[in-house]
């Protein structure tokens, strides 16, 4: 659980390795952890999914859409 701004909590689940300890302060761009590898993969339509990251954003205890907090990119 990260607190990116006062009144907001960002919950991440699915990381195999988490960097840092409770109470650490991260600077912008710091990695928070690593996803798991190929072990435990499951078959899905169109291929194999090996990792799933759950993201939840809360503002003052209420769940909100995390989309605006992330930059949209397009591969060319």
Image (cartoon, helix red, strand yellow):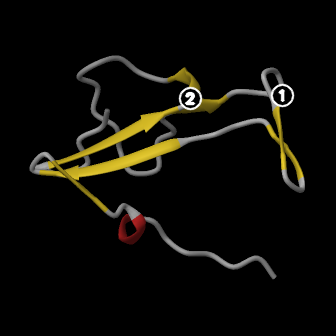
Q: What element carries label 1?
A: loop
Q: How far apart are marks 1 and 2 (CA)?
A: 13 Å
Q: In this view, does 40 lie to the left or right of 28?
A: right
- Residue 38 is labelled as 1
Residue 70 in the figure: left or right of residue 36 = left
Viewport quadrant of the C terminus: bottom right
* Place of residue 11 in the rendered image (x, y in percent of width and height, measured from the top left): 35, 39
User: Mark 2: which secondary structure?
Assistant: strand
Where is mark 2, residue-wise? 15
Q: Quadrant of residue 50?
A: top right
Quarter residue 16 falls in: top right
Kindly indicate whether the residue at mark 2 contacts the one at mark 1 (C-beta within 8 angstroms). no
Q: Which of 58 and 34 is in front in this view?
A: 58
Percent across and percent down for residue 60 are 9, 50
Viewer-proximal residue, 69 or 43? 43
Q: Which residue is drawn at 23% across and 41% down?
A: 3
Q: Residue at x 27, y 33 (%)?
A: 25
Quarter in which the N terminus is drawn: top left
Q: How crowded is mark 2: few (under 14 residues within 10 Å), some or many (20 or more)?
A: some
Vertical arrangement, residue 11 with respect to residue 17, above or below: below
For marks 1 and 2, the one nearer the N-term is: 2
Rendering coords of residue 28 (x, y %): 39, 51
């Amino acid at each position: 659980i990260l607190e990116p701004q006062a009144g907001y909590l960002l919950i991440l689940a699915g990381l195999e390795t988490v960097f840092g300890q409770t109470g650490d302060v991260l600077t912008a761009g710091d990695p928070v952890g690593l996803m798991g590898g190929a072990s435990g993969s499951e078959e899905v339509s169109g291929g194999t999914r090996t990792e799933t990251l759950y993201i939840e954003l809360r503002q003052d205890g209420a769940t909100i859409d995390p989309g605006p907090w992330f930059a949209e990119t397009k591969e060319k």
